[in-house]
Amino acid sequence: MAGRFVQLAVLGLALVVALVLAACGAATSPTQSASAPAASGARPSSPAVVAIEEPKSGAMIDGDSVHIVLSLTRATIVSATTTDIRPDTGHIHLYVNNVLVSMNYGLEQDIPVHPGTYVVRAEFVAADHAPFNRRVWTPEVFFTVK
């Protein structure tokens, strides 16, 4: 009886971890083109356009942080996470060197850096943190920290 309880507890924990990773977008990297299915079927597409305004590609940065400025057109950032998704509302996911570093609800933020070369990319995702069907990515921006 106790063995069965432990099996169910482990299975439940594994399910919770899988759901959290999927909701946060950690299950896919920005180089993958997988999209999570919506509860009702296919994911919607979005008219959004997101771009990195700062830093400019090729920039040389001094200091221990870099100020990231994004622009977003034809969509709005919302702070609430919901499964009632719309094509023109969502969140920004910021990737540094292909690692998700932020699930931001704004268009500006400072990220810590150390000397080296970096690649930054952002994605506009639905309000459930899953990608749209045609992922909405910025072009990659490369910069170097002295």
Image (cartoon, rainbow, N blue to C red):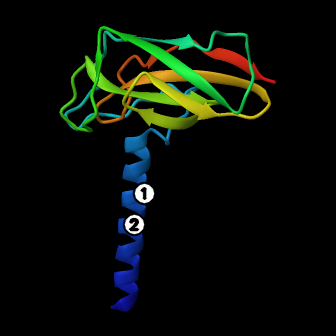
Q: Quadrant of the N terminus?
A: bottom left
Nearest to the observer: residue 75 or residue 68: 68
Under circle 1, the secondary element is: helix
Marking on residue 27:
none
Nearest to the observer: residue 26 or residue 38: 26
Numbered label tally: 2
User: Which residue is under mark 2?
Assistant: 13
The residue positioned 61% from the left and 23% from the top of the image is 120
Nearest to the observer: residue 144 or residue 8: 144
- Circles 2 and 1, Cβ within 8 Å, touching? The answer is yes
Under circle 2, the secondary element is: helix
Q: Position of residue 103 (x, y in %)?
A: 43, 35
Q: Quadrant of the C terminus?
A: top right
Q: Amino acid at mark 2?
A: Leu
Q: Amino acid at mark 1?
A: Val
User: Which residue is under mark 1?
Assistant: 17
